[in-house]
């Protein structure tokens, strides 16, 4: 990977995926790697600008790298995920998901709640959950190893904030991953 010109870390529910793009500015060569696995290879492209579309992760999330020309032989590379710019995708993702990083029994766990479906992912796999209605909230119960967990959903009382989701593990509230919310590029543990 000698001509890598762009790298993106893309957080999906099944994990964080690294996208690397090689572009030979004299040969037009284009190589796309997803998690260090070659997805696209094109040698000797006569058109130096354009786009490459591919899928990311087991969910086959659509991604497109746009190759744009600047002044001289300077190029700009942008990434779209599911038809949205990378920046817009990260903003939308932080509204649609909650992510927690746990360290339990010597192992790292990445828990993701998809708010629109209420699916819960643990280290890249959807896990079985049970929904429970309690007096002032709902709880989504599941297990991580030998630990009892649930995500409680409570109204914030403010229409702009909506529902607040909190992960509880063995009666301990786990703070949401701040790195993912601010930058969108947390690396999997």
Image: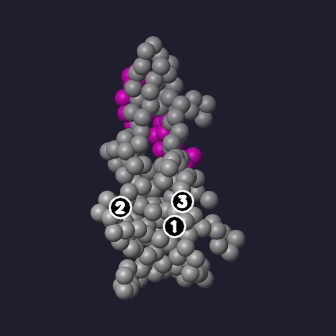
Q: Residue at x 40, y 54 (%)?
A: 93
**Residue 120 in sight from this viewpoint:** yes
The crowding category of the residue bearing disc 2, from other C-alpha atoms within 10 Å (few below 14, some 14 to 19, many at least 20), is few
Q: Measure how far apart labels 3 and 1 are at the Cα level.
A: 10 Å
- Prevailing SS of the magenta stretch: strand
Visual colour scheme: one colour
Residue assigned mark 3: 177
Residue 175's quadrant in the figure?
A: bottom right
Vertically, is 124 above or below 172?
Answer: above
The crowding category of the residue bearing disc 1, from other C-alpha atoms within 10 Å (few below 14, some 14 to 19, many at least 20), is many
Residue 76: % across, % down:
44, 27
Q: Tell me the quadrant of the picture where the N terminus can be found.
A: top right
Q: Residue at x 39, y 26 (%)?
A: 68
Of the two numbered discs 3 and 1 in the rendering, the one whose residue sits closer to the viewer: 3
Residue 61: % across, % down:
39, 53
**Residue 17 in sight from this viewpoint:** no
Q: Residue at x 70, y 71 (%)?
A: 106
Residue 105: % across, % down:
68, 75
Left or right of 57? Residue 157 is left
Q: Of label 3 and label 1, which has the lower sequence position?
A: 1
- Magenta part of the protein: which range? 31-53
Furthest residue toward right = 106
Q: Measure how far apart labels 1 and 2 are at the Cα level.
A: 22 Å
Residue assigned mark 2: 161
Tell me, for residue 111, which label it has, or none.
Answer: 1
The crowding category of the residue bearing disc 3, from other C-alpha atoms within 10 Å (few below 14, some 14 to 19, many at least 20), is some
Left or right of 115? Residue 73 is right
Q: Secondary structure at mark 1?
A: strand
Q: Measure how far apart labels 2 and 3 are at the Cα level.
A: 18 Å
Q: Residue at x 42, y 39 (%)?
A: 79
């Amino acid at each position: 990977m000698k001509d890598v010109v762009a790298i993106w870390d893309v957080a999906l529910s099944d994990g964080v995926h690294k996208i690397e793009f090689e572009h030979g500015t004299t040969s037009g060569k284009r190589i796309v790697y997803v998690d260090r696995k070659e997805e696209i290879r094109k040698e000797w492209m006569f058109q130096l600008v354009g786009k490459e579309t591919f899928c990311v992760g087991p969910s086959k999330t659509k991604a497109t790298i746009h190759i744009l020309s600047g002044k001289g032989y300077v190029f700009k590379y942008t990434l779209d995920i599911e038809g949205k710019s990378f920046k817009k995708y990260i903003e939308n993702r932080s509204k649609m998901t909650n992510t927690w990083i746990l360290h339990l029994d010597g192992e790292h766990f990445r828990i993701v709640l998809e708010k629109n479906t209420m699916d819960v992912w643990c280290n890249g796999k959807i896990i079985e959950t049970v929904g429970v209605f309690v007096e002032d909230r709902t709880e989504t119960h599941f297990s991580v190893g030998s630990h009892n967990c649930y995500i409680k959903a409570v109204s914030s009382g403010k229409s702009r904030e909506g529902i607040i989701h909190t992960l509880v593990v063995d009666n301990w509230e786990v703070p949401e991953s701040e790195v993912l919310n601010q930058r969108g590029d947390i690396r999997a543990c």
